[in-house]
């Protein structure tokens, strides 16, 4: 089972969080990650973030990354969105 955690943080406090699960065996890891990030964005009522080189590098290295204002086309009501793979 694949699980991805997401949390919105403002001034070092978590303002919202969620965990997205995907039990599909047909999807690749990349498809699961991108689908889970889309679901998180919908749940938090946000546009999907843009993946920058920094995010891709961090995610490959640590299975976690932060999306800041640079990753969104709209203003955010928080400082960053952090995602992390909990289980694969």
Image (cartoon, grey):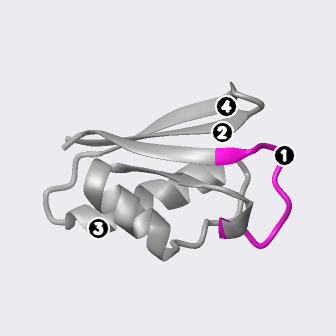
Disc 3, SS: helix
Q: Report which residue position mark 2 lands on.
A: 8
User: Is 52 situated above or below 80?
Assistant: below
Numbered range of the magenta stretch: 71-80
Residue closest to the far top: 13
Look at the numbered discs 1 and 4 and tell me whether their residues touch, using CB distance below 8 Å. Answer: no
Look at the numbered discs 2 and 4 and tell me whether their residues touch, using CB distance below 8 Å. Answer: yes
Q: Residue at x 42, y 62 (%)?
A: 35
Q: What distance separates the C-alpha of mark 1 from that of mark 4? A: 11 Å
Q: Report which residue position mark 3 lands on.
A: 30
User: Is 39 situated above or below 55?
Assistant: above
Q: Is residue 84 left or right of residue 82?
A: left
Crowding near the residue tagged with mark 1, few <14, some 14–19, many ≥20 C-alpha atoms within 10 Å: few
Q: Position of residue 69 (x, y in %)?
A: 74, 60
Q: Earlier in the sequence, mark 4 or mark 3?
A: 4
Q: Report which residue position mark 1 lands on.
A: 77
Q: Residue at x 54, y 44 (%)?
A: 82
Crowding near the residue tagged with mark 4, few <14, some 14–19, many ≥20 C-alpha atoms within 10 Å: some
The kind of secondary structure the magenta stretch mainly shows is loop
Q: Report which residue position mark 4 lands on.
A: 16
Q: Quadrant of the C terminus?
A: top left
Q: Residue at x 36, y 57 (%)?
A: 59
Disc 1, SS: loop
């Amino acid at each position: 089972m694949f699980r991805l955690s997401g949390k919105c943080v403002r001034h070092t406090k978590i303002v919202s969080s969620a965990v997205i699960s995907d039990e599909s065996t047909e999807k690749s890891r990349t498809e699961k990650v991108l689908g889970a990030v889309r679901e998180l964005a919908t749940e938090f009522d946000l546009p999907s973030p843009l993946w920058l080189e920094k995010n891709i590098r961090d995610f490959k290295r640590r299975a976690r990354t932060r999306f800041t204002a640079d990753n969104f086309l709209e203003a955010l009501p928080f400082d960053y969105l952090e995602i992390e793979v909990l289980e694969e």
